[in-house]
Amino acid sequence: MDVRIDDVDRKILAALQRDAAQSLDDIAKEIGSSKTPVWNRIKKLKAAGVIGQQTVMLDAEALGFEACFFVLIRTSEHEADWQAKFLAALQARPEVQEAHRLAGDIDYILKVRVQNARAYDAFYQALISEVRVFNVTALLSMEEIKSTVALPL
């Protein structure tokens, strides 16, 4: 569905990115509108696919997931069967928070959140037992400096 985003929509989206749990009254007050037009715009943005799944951001460290690894993967396999098997292996592992196919020397990068290095090794061993990869490099994040899912509206 094709949707045209105007300044009011952008204000609503910015407010939702900051806190999707806030009331319609609060959003309406912030953008200088009333509740019903804001609700109608949000429904329109959801129907158009601009607003996707709504969820809660959890604190990984508070829940014991203290290690974040960025995993660089090179493969010599590029056939559709291998890619399907690789995708299925990634989808089956909740430790993988993000996975990207890249242009350049590295084929894939994964963001993997686990409790510690031992848990990462278990993840790594399981992954390479399911799919053949040419080279894997794991980089441990020492400190998260910035993390956001907000788009620059």
Image (spheres, rainbow, N blue to C red):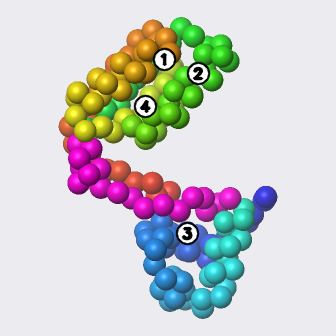
The disc at residue 85 is 2
Q: Is residue 15 magenta?
A: no
Q: Is residue 9 visible?
A: yes
Amino acid type, callout 4: Leu
Amino acid type, callout 2: Lys
Secondary structure at badge 4 equals strand
Q: Residue at x 42, y 16 (%)?
A: 128
Secondary structure at badge 2 equals helix
How far apart are the two marked residues, 2 and 4, measured between alpha carbons? 16 Å
Q: Is residue 102 visible?
A: no
Per the rendered image, the range of residues in magenta is 49-66
Q: Give the main secondary structure, helix, strand or loop, of the magenta stretch.
A: loop
Closer to viewer: mark 1 or mark 4: 1
Name the residue that disc number 4 marks: 110
Secondary structure at badge 3 equals helix
Q: Position of residue 82 (x, y in %)?
A: 60, 16
Which sits earlier in the primary sequence, circle 3 or circle 2? 3
Name the residue that disc number 1 marks: 130
